[in-house]
Amino acid sequence: MTTVVFSHGKESGPWGSKITTLSNVANDMGFGVESIDYQDLDCPEARLERLKETIAEKCNDVVLVGSSMGGYVSLAAASQISARGVFLMAPALYLPNYKIQRFPYDGYVSLVHGWNDDIVPIENSLKYARHQKAQLLLLNDGHRLANSKSVISPFFRNWLEKFRY
């Protein structure tokens, strides 16, 4: 069974509103769900190691979903763990204090980002999407994408459909 592994952002938790909403979609579609708790780790590289360890222990066939710092962690791990796909929400890509600045993963990636994001510049998602020819959904929302769950949920369902057997 394919497992959807969620990675939350720096100031969120493993069952924040976006993850809860999208995990319900994944469950309804018959996927396994795992949401990792990183609240004790501020360092993105430490979170990356936890993600890789958790997958090694619990999951074989995975799809990664990450929000903000969790997006960075998910994309950084994707090629190392052979993820089937990566779904990113306002991912913290290309930030100056983050160790990884190049993402060699060449699998299926979709991004969602808010035009009004005041935490991660929208240009960072545009740069990644342009370079990788990745699918990018831009919304009239901020970093937390709090007003867009009704749009993100069906977009995610459609994206996740690609990974059903």
Image (tube, helix red, strand yellow):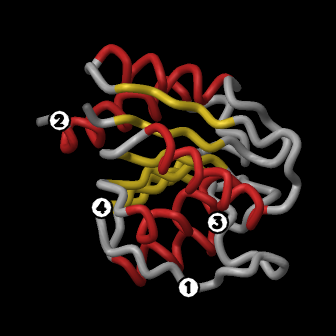
Q: Amino acid at mark 1?
A: Arg
Could you tell me which secondary element the residue under label 4 belongs to? strand
Task: Give yes or no for contact between labels 4 and 3 (Cβ–Cβ under 8 Å).
Answer: no
- Label 2 or label 4, whichever lies nearer to me, is 2
Q: CA distance from mark 1 to mark 3?
A: 17 Å
Of the image marks 4 and 1, the number of the one nearer the N terminus: 1
Residue extending furthest toward the left: 165
Q: CA distance from mark 4 to mark 3?
A: 20 Å
Q: CA distance from mark 2 to mark 3?
A: 30 Å
Disc 4 crowd rating (10 Å Cα; few below 14, some 14-19, many 20+) is some
Give the quadrant of residue 45.
bottom right
Q: Which residue is mark 1?
A: 102
Q: CA distance from mark 2 to mark 4?
A: 14 Å
State the residue in front, 67 or 73: 73
Q: Which residue is mark 3?
A: 122
Q: CA distance from mark 1 to mark 2?
A: 29 Å
Of the image marks 2 and 3, the number of the one nearer the N terminus: 3
Which of the numbered marks, if any, corresponds to residue 164? 2
Of the image marks 1 and 3, the number of the one nearer the N terminus: 1
Of the image marks 1 and 2, the number of the one nearer the N terminus: 1
Q: Is residue 93 left or right of residue 5?
A: right
Q: Amino acid at mark 2?
A: Arg
Percent x, y of residue 61? 30, 45
Could you tell me which secondary element the residue under label 2 belongs to? loop
Disc 3 crowd rating (10 Å Cα; few below 14, some 14-19, many 20+) is many
Of the image marks 4 and 3, the number of the one nearer the N terminus: 4
Q: Amino acid at mark 4?
A: Tyr
Q: CA distance from mark 4 to mark 1?
A: 16 Å
Q: Which residue is mark 4?
A: 108
